[in-house]
Amino acid sequence: MDPTYLRTVLAQWASGVVVVTTLREGGGRHGMTASSFTSVALEPPLVSVCLATDSTTCRSVRRSGVFAVNMLGHDHEEIGRRFASPADAGDRFSVPQRLSHPAGSAPAVPRWDTATTGAPVLADAVAWVDCVVAACHPAGDHTIVLGLVQDAAAPRPAPPLIYHDRTYYEGIAR
C-alpha cells in the first residue's frame, strides 16, 4: 500500500483535534497536535493516543510516565496548528492566540494550568484528561499509549474543533 495514497484515504475520516501534552526531561513542557485519541474503558478509566515512536512526544511521554489530552474547541484552530508545527518552532505554550482578541488589543496568550500529574492542561479546553502511562504497545512506526486517567475536567462547553481532509472545521453547535 502506498503510504501517500493511504494518508489521502484516511484523511476522509473526520476526527476531533487534541493537543497531547507531557513533561520534558528537566521539567519543561512539550506538546503536539493529534487526532488519534480515543476512550478505551471506564473501569478502569483508560484512554489511548497513538504517537510516532521516534517523536519527541513519544520519548517524553515514556520518560515522564505522564500525559494529558486537551480537547480543542472550534476557536482553538490556531493552537491546533501551532502544536502541529515542527518541534523547533519555539515555545508553543507561550505564543499569543491571534484569532481570539478584539481589534486593536494585544493577542491573548493561552493559559496553561498544571494537572495532578504535572502535565500541562489548557485552561479553556472543551475538556481534558490527565493520565499516567498504563502501557505502551508497538504498532508499526507508532506506539499506542494507554493512559490511566487520574483526573478530568470539562472547563467550557463549546463546539469541538474537527479535522477532515487536511482542513479544520467547527464542530456541531450545542
Image (cartoon, rainbow, N blue to C red):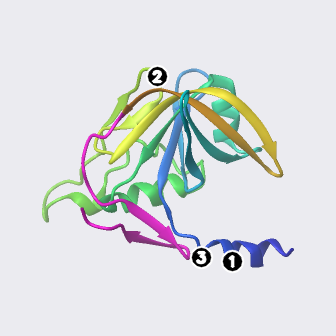
- Name which of mark 1 and mark 2 comes first in the sequence: 1
Asked if the residues shown at circle 1 and circle 3 are in contact, with their CB atoms under 8 angstroms apart, the answer is: yes
Query: Would you name the residue on which mark 3 appears?
Result: 12
Q: What percent of the width, then of the height, locates residue 131?
A: 52, 29
The reply to whether dot 1 and dot 2 touch (C-beta < 8 Å) is no
Helix, strand or loop at label 3? It is: loop
Q: Nearer the viewer, residue 106 or 163?
A: 163
Q: Which mark is residue 9?
A: 1
The Cα atoms of the two marked residues, 1 and 2, are separated by 37 Å
Viewer-closest of 54 and 117: 117
User: What SS does tag 1 mark?
Assistant: helix
Is residue 158 covered in magenta? yes
Magenta residue check for 102:
no
Point out the stretch of residues depicted in magenta. Answer: 153-174
Residue shown at the point (68%, 77%) measured from the top left: 9
Q: How many marks?
A: 3
- Dot 2, how many residues are within 10 Å of its Cα: few (below 14), some (14-19), or many (20+)? some
Q: Amino acid at mark 3?
A: Gln
Q: Locate residue 93: give its quadrant.
A: top left
Q: Local crowd at mark 1 within 10 Å, few (<14), some, or many (≥20)?
A: few
Residue 73 to residue 48: above or below: below
